[in-house]
Image: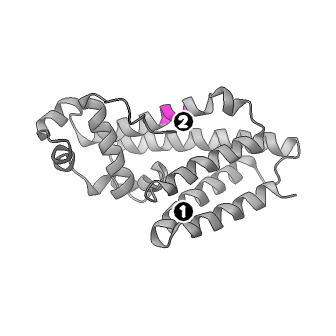
Amino acid sequence: MTTPSASIVPDTRTQILNLAEQLLLSRGYNAFSYQHIARELGVKAAAIHYHYPSKEDLGATIIRRQRGRLRKWRGLPELLALSAAGQLEALFDVYRTHVRQEQRVCLFGSLAAEFRTLPAAMQQELRLFNRELTEWLAEVLAAGRAVGELTFRGAAVAKAAQVLTTLAGALQVARVHDEANFYLILEQVRTELLDH
């Protein structure tokens, strides 16, 4: 769930994808066009259509890439070696990174507000991304509760959905106010799950 290294010069296809992802996370899907990308990269819009025939293709590819990043991150040996509480803290670190990067919202937070206007392929990809992240977090929460590291009431999947929704909302609150509000919300989530 990290972004590619800046030291590697990506090919045109990847440059398009990287810029489109930045625009999507900073403005939203409906607030940028191929003209924005073409202008920023100094290419013709036809070059973008060559790689991504439609904006729907581009948007779905962004979400698929995020799903791939999520899977890669979940499988990192250093993450798997952590306790459930450590894995939860690693997830919090991802959201901390978002707020430090120009108060960027997460993928779900960016697209959920526009969900009804998104093309069907993007809606499906976003549902899959959210389901995979929620299921992973539910497993972490259940494992942590089983060994006494984490505490919460109710079903793990419901708590996972609540935590993810809260984190996505906290990123949006940080845009309106400042980072301090994000950290207040995050600390409340941590306190509820980790303090016994």
Q: Nearer the viewer, residue 141 or 76?
A: 76
Left or right for 67, reference 19: right
Vertical position of residue 7 compared to residue 145: above or below:
above
Where's residue 90, x and y in %?
65, 43
Q: Name the residue type under label 2.
A: Leu
Residue 161 disc label: none
Decide if residue 155 is in sight here. Answer: yes
Give the prevailing secondary structure in the magenta stretch: helix
Left or right for 134, reference 14: right
Query: Which segment did they paint magenta?
Result: 67-71
Q: Residue at x 77, y 61 (%)?
A: 191
Q: Which residue is drawn at 60% across and 53% down?
A: 164
Query: Which residue is the site of mark 1?
Result: 169
Where's residue 89, x and y in %?
69, 47
Q: Which residue is drawn at 54% across and 66% down?
A: 179
Going from N to C along the chain, the mark reached first, 2 or 1, is 2
Q: Name the residue type under label 1.
A: Gly
Colour basis: one colour
- Quadrant where the C terminus sits is bottom right
**Mark 2: which secondary structure?**
helix
Where's residue 131, x and y in %?
57, 42
Give the Cα separation between the discs numbered 2 and 1: 20 Å
Query: Which residue is the site of mark 2?
Result: 70
Badge 2 local density, few (<14 within 10 Å), some, or many (20+)? some
Q: Which of 40 and 130 is in front in this view?
A: 40
Q: Which of 66 and 102 is in front in this view?
A: 102
Q: Reply yes or no: does residue 195 show up in magenta.
A: no
